[in-house]
Amino acid sequence: MVGGDGLTPAVKKEADAALKAHGLIKVRVFSDDRLARDAMLRELSDELNAAPIQHIGKLLVLWRPIPEKERTVDEDRMPGPRDVKIVKYSKRGGQRPEIKTLRVLGNQRLTPGGNIKRAKAKRPLSAKKRNQAD
């Protein structure tokens, strides 16, 4: 919202943050002068590198493509816990299956029987293979 003070640096900063987050924003201007609102729309679109989409009454619509977020890949990171549902069917046909929810940690695995086992540690290299690697 643009108040009686007009386009202040705080308003521009908030509009820039909203464009980064959403891409398309509406800005309400509390001014009765249409030419002043047109000037505000042009100034906002020039300073924020956004496209002026629409100007209807006291509402200004701006658009700018959302920048892609850079994700850092952490190679040392282990997988987190996950919840797994286990369904055990009854040997008798008419009964309901038994459903259990288990939390499996990153160093664990689920066996076909529904048990949780820890992952085996890597075997150390033999002296022969260590010498071959050098």
Image: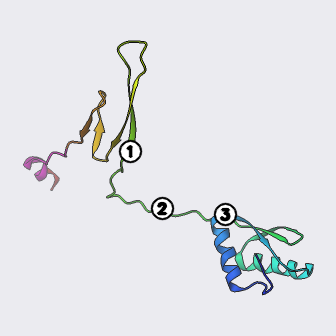
- Residue 114, x across and y down, in percent: 31, 30
- Residue 31, x across and y down, in percent: 86, 80
Mark 2 or mark 3, which is nearer the start of the sequence?
Answer: 3
Horizontally, is 92 left or right of 38 in the view? left
Secondary element at tag 1: strand
Task: Please name the amino acid that badge 2 sits on.
Answer: Arg
Secondary element at tag 2: loop
On residue 82, which mark appears? Answer: 1
Q: Looking at the image, is mark 1 or mark 2 nearer the viewer?
A: 1
- Residue 35, x across and y down, in percent: 91, 81
What separation in Å lies between label 3 and label 2 (alpha carbons)? 19 Å
Q: Start and end of the magenta stretch?
A: 121-131
- Can residue 106 be seen here? yes
Secondary element at tag 3: helix
Quarter occupied by residue 39: bottom right
Closest to the observer: 70 or 16? 16
Residue beneath disc 2:
71
Quarter occupied by residue 10: bottom right
Q: Residue at x 68, y 69 (%)?
A: 19
Task: Please name the amino acid that badge 3 sits on.
Answer: His
Q: Looking at the image, is mark 3 or mark 1 nearer the viewer?
A: 1
Q: Looking at the image, is mark 3 or mark 2 nearer the viewer?
A: 3
On residue 37, which mark appears? Answer: none
Do tag 3 and tag 2 residues touch (Cβ < 8 Å)? no
On residue 22, which mark appears? Answer: 3
